[in-house]
Image: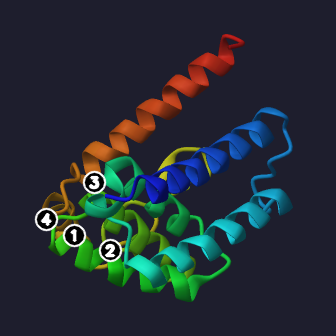
């Protein structure tokens, strides 16, 4: 295992999440635009992940540990300025899942993100939109009848369970907002 690569990936993930939180807390994060500071960070992280992949292949658990592998996935998930690279990462994650070197949910989320960004139906039902009343609703799903079987193969709960979790989170958010929290 490469601790230095793992540390670097985790640092990239931490910086990403801290900047998002900082901008969100300050009210600087518009819901309909890609904040320039976030975009610049995502592009820098994407560039570095490409270098890592070129040198070592996909940074899976065997190379960077579970947290490092999660961080690599997050960088790929946020590489929205480079859809071709995101699509390449899907293939790398498929291979890594096949050798049990990453968690299956990482493949599901990235593959669905690539599909929805391209305007295509998702495959695993991980990407959600918000309906007119502010409730989560999954983006269109290819072969919706088989989605729970596909989700189960990658260790995810059913779409119905996931939707209920998201609705419960929204109910709690609304209750906290009503009570001034």
Q: Earlier in the sequence, mark 4 or mark 1?
A: 1
How many marks the image carries: the answer is: 4
Do the numbered discs 1 and 3 sit on residues whose CB atoms are within 8 Å?
A: no
The C terminus sits in image quarter:
top right
Residue nearest the viewer, comparing 52 with 92: 52
Q: Earlier in the sequence, mark 2 or mark 3?
A: 2
Q: Quadrant of residue 91?
A: bottom left
Q: Earlier in the sequence, mark 4 or mark 3?
A: 4
Mark yes or no: residue 78 visible: yes
Q: Could you say which disc has been placed on residue 149 in the image?
A: 4
Q: CA distance from mark 1 to mark 3?
A: 21 Å
Which secondary structure, mark 1? helix
Do the numbered discs 2 and 3 sit on residues whose CB atoms are within 8 Å?
A: no
Q: CA distance from mark 4 to mark 3?
A: 10 Å
Residue nearest the viewer, comparing 49 with 124: 49
| Mark 2 or mark 3, whichever is nearer to me | 2
Residue 70 vertical placement versus 91 (above, below): above
Q: Quadrant of residue 123?
A: bottom left
* Disc 1: which residue: 97
* Disc 2: which residue: 93
The N terminus sits in image quarter:
bottom left
Q: Decide if residue 41 is on the left or right side of residue 90.
A: right
| Mark 1 or mark 3, whichever is nearer to me | 1
* Disc 3: which residue: 159
């Amino acid at each position: 295992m490469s601790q230095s690569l793992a540390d670097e990936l985790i640092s990239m993930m931490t910086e990403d999440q801290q900047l998002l939180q900082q901008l969100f807390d300050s009210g600087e994060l518009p819901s309909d635009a890609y904040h320039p500071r976030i975009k610049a960070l995502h592009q820098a992280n994407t560039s570095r992940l490409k270098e890592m992949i070129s040198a070592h292949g996909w940074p899976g658990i065997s190379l960077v540990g579970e947290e490092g592998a999660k961080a690599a996935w997050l960088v790929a998930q946020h590489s929205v300025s480079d859809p071709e690279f995101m699509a390449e990462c899907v293939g790398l994650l498929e291979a890594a899942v096949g050798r049990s070197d990453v968690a299956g949910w990482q493949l599901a989320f990235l593959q669905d993100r690539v599909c929805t960004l391209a305007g295509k139906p998702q495959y695993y039902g991980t990407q959600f939109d918000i309906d007119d009343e502010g409730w989560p609703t999954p983006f269109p799903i290819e072969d919706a009848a088989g989605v729970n079987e596909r989700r189960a193969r990658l260790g995810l709960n059913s779409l119905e369970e996931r939707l209920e979790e998201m609705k419960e989170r929204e109910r709690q958010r609304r209750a906290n907002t009503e009570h001034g929290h």
